[in-house]
Image (cartoon, grey):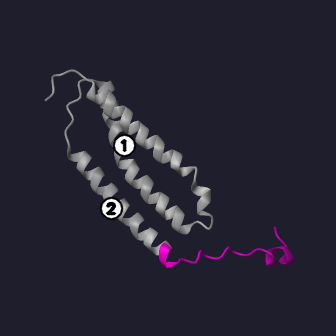
Amino acid sequence: MLGPSAAAGLTHPAAPKLTGFDVAELVVAGGLALLGVRSLLRWLRLDFPARGAGERVLYSLHVMARVGLWFAFALFFVGSALSEEPAGLRWYVLVLIALAGVQMLTTLALGRGGGSRP
């Protein structure tokens, strides 16, 4: 248990001050999140006639990467707006690159399938 002198030294961090640029980033993040929801609803409505479990997994990864990119970009803008050190978010670019890579690889794998589909 903390004594009165130790408890007096504890302070809550101040809420970040939002500038006009930060508010604009949050608005962009909201727009990207809405596009992510729209993309998710669009992809859930599509019927994909998979020929096997492997193709179904590839398609699920593809949809996850496409929809996930919208939300990842939205979170990047939220983090940039609310972070006191936006330069500390440079590692997050790897998340975006990984999702784009998964999307590209699953597109190639699904596209090289047999010629039974138009």
Magenta span of residues: 1-21
Residue 7 lies in magenta, yes or no?
Answer: yes
What main secondary structure does the magenta stretch of the protein show? loop
What residue does disc 2 label?
34
**Which x, y percent locates residue 117?**
15, 27
* Crowding near the residue tagged with mark 2, few <14, some 14–19, many ≥20 C-alpha atoms within 10 Å: some
Q: 37 left or right of 20? A: left
Sequence-wise, which precedes: disc 2 or disc 1?
2
Give the residue at x 31% y 58%. 35
Q: Is residue 81 above or below residue 70?
A: below
Residue 37 lies in magenta, yes or no?
Answer: no
**Which x, y percent locates residue 101?**
43, 38
Give the residue at x 58% y 66%. 83
- What's the CA distance linking mark 2 and mark 1? 16 Å
What residue does disc 1 label?
64
Q: Circle 1 — which element?
A: helix
